[in-house]
Image (cartoon, helix red, strand yellow):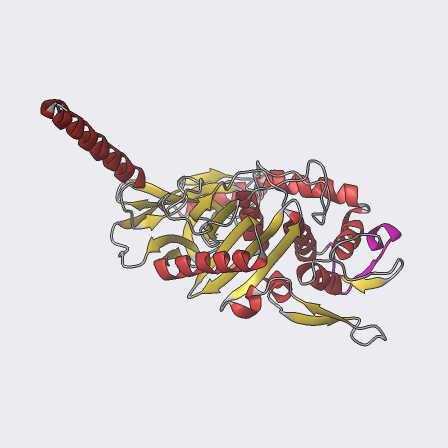
């Protein structure tokens, strides 16, 4: 058999060139290493190389730093999937918002309708006409994933479940959730009821702004009807709150369609993580992969704080207002996420504020922004808002102020 040596050499060279090209492409896909990972101009971006799969068993997943909203890892995070009982995160959010707004009190009584008592699946076995406090209903929702308690709470807040679902979808729209639509308040299978790992993480982050919720989601066991003839022992469906150090929420979910789902949170050393997995094959894999996601964030990242919550950042001059100046304070901690081992050198921030603003100024009105840079690149922007309203001054006050400035002039 005659072998064409030259042709064989050419083939080998072509193969070598192809392998070299593939290596270069794969290396470029990983991107350059970066010491700072944060939302750029409000848009979250993933900072984990695509080759790292922290949740191989999940159909969809995301790992987020709750403080900054930085996405550390994501996998099919915008896929629209059935969320099962993770739906109750929005139900709990609307409940705690009503508590914080004063529309509800923890000791308010919630009556159970026949419809609420008829819910199947996970429940706290409410009887038609039975009353529990808001506090007890929250325990039943957060710990036991009570479908009956969720509907009872929805009816208390909105008059009917359908009206409450409208509130849920409106709130989802306000939060900018593009992959979410609710058809009920508890996550039982329903047409046109879906969400995504990304949207659930955003909901979870919003819920965590209400610190009272951790009392419920972080408890491993408790009782309902404790002093009655039929006490009901609650055991949290989220076993991580007992077995993972720092875990204190948030919500599990399961249906045959959705498989095993979890939105979990844990806090260590000033960092709070949110991890969401959807479509896991079993609880063991679900809990193991979420634990691994937490381990990854806590071992690899740290927070660099620009301003602590409550810090006075600047003073804004008000033209023709009841007050001449308005202090601008940090609503929350303004921070960026850094990879451990990377110093904060090159991290700087600038205030973007007008010299003055004309009254009236509304409470919560955006008046400027704090821009955080790494070198010349913008890595984070925080909106600065007025802490209080400043009405326009009356003509007499303005006249006296003008007259006073004339007499005090040099």
The location of residue 108, given as percent across then percent down, is: 79, 62
Q: Residue furthest front?
A: 1
Left or right, 129 with reference to 9: right
- The residue at 82%/47% (across/down) is 159
Q: Is 215 in the magenta?
A: no
The location of residue 190, given as percent across then percent down, is: 72, 40
Q: Is residue 246 visible?
A: yes
Which residues fall within the magenta stretch?
103-117
Identify which residue, 173 or 300, lies in the foreground: 300
Q: Is residue 310 visible?
A: no
- The residue at 67%/54% (across/down) is 92
Q: Indicate whether 299 appears above or below 194.
A: below
Give the quadrant of residue 138.
bottom right
Q: Indicate whether 30 appears above or below 105.
A: above
The location of residue 178, given as percent across then percent down, is: 57, 36
Identify which residue, 186 or 379, lies in the foreground: 186
Q: Residue furthest left?
A: 6
Identify which residue, 158 or 16, lies in the foreground: 16
From the image, which quarter does the N terminus lie in? top left
Left or right, 244 with reference to 53: right
């Amino acid at each position: 058999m005659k072998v064409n040596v030259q042709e064989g050499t050419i083939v080998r060279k072509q193969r070598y060139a192809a392998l070299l090209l593939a290596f270069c492409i794969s290396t470029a896909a990983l991107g350059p290493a970066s010491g700072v990972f944060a939302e750029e101009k409000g848009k979250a971006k993933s900072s984990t190389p695509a080759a790292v799969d922290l949740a191989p068993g999940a159909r969809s997943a995301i790992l987020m730093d709750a403080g900054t909203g930085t996405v550390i890892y994501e996998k099919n995070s915008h896929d629209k999937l059935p969320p099962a009982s993770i739906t109750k995160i929005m139900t709990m959010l609307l409940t705690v918002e009503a508590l914080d707004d004063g529309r509800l009190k923890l000791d308010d009584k919630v009556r159970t309708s026949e419809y609420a008592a008829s819910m199947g699946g996970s429940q706290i076995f409410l009887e038609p006409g039975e009353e529990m406090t808001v506090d007890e209903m929250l325990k039943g929702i957060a710990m036991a994933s009570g479908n009956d308690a969720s509907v009872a709470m929805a009816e208390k807040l909105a008059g009917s479940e359908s009206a409450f679902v409208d509130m849920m979808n409106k709130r989802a729209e306000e939060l900018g959730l593009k992959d979410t639509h609710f058809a009920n308040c508890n996550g039982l299978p329903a047409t046109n009821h879906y969400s995504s790992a990304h949207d659930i993480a955003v909901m979870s982050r919003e819920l965590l702004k209400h610190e009272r919720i951790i009392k419920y989601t972080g408890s491993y066991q408790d009782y309902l009807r404790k002093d009655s003839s039929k006490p009901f022992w609650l055991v949290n469906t989220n076993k991580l709150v007992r077995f993972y150090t720092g875990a204190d929420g948030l919500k599990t979910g399961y249906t045959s369609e959705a498989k095993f789902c979890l939105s979990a949170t844990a806090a260590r050393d000033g960092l709070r993580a949110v991890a969401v997995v959807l479509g896991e094959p079993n609880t063991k894999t679900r809990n193991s992969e979420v634990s691994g996601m937490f381990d990854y964030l806590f071992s690899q990242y740290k927070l660099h704080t620009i301003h602590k919550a409550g810090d006075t950042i600047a003073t804004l001059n008000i033209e023709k207002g009841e007050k001449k100046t308005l202090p601008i304070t940090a609503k929350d901690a303004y921070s960026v996420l850094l990879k451990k081992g990377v110093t904060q050198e090159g991290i700087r921030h600038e205030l973007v504020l007008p010299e003055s603003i004309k009254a009236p100024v509304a409470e919560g009105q955006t008046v400027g922004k704090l821009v955080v840079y790494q070198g010349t690149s913008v890595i984070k922007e925080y909106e600065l808002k007025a802490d209080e309203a400043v009405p326009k001054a009356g003509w007499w006050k303005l006249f006296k102020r003008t007259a006073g400035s004339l007499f005090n002039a040099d």
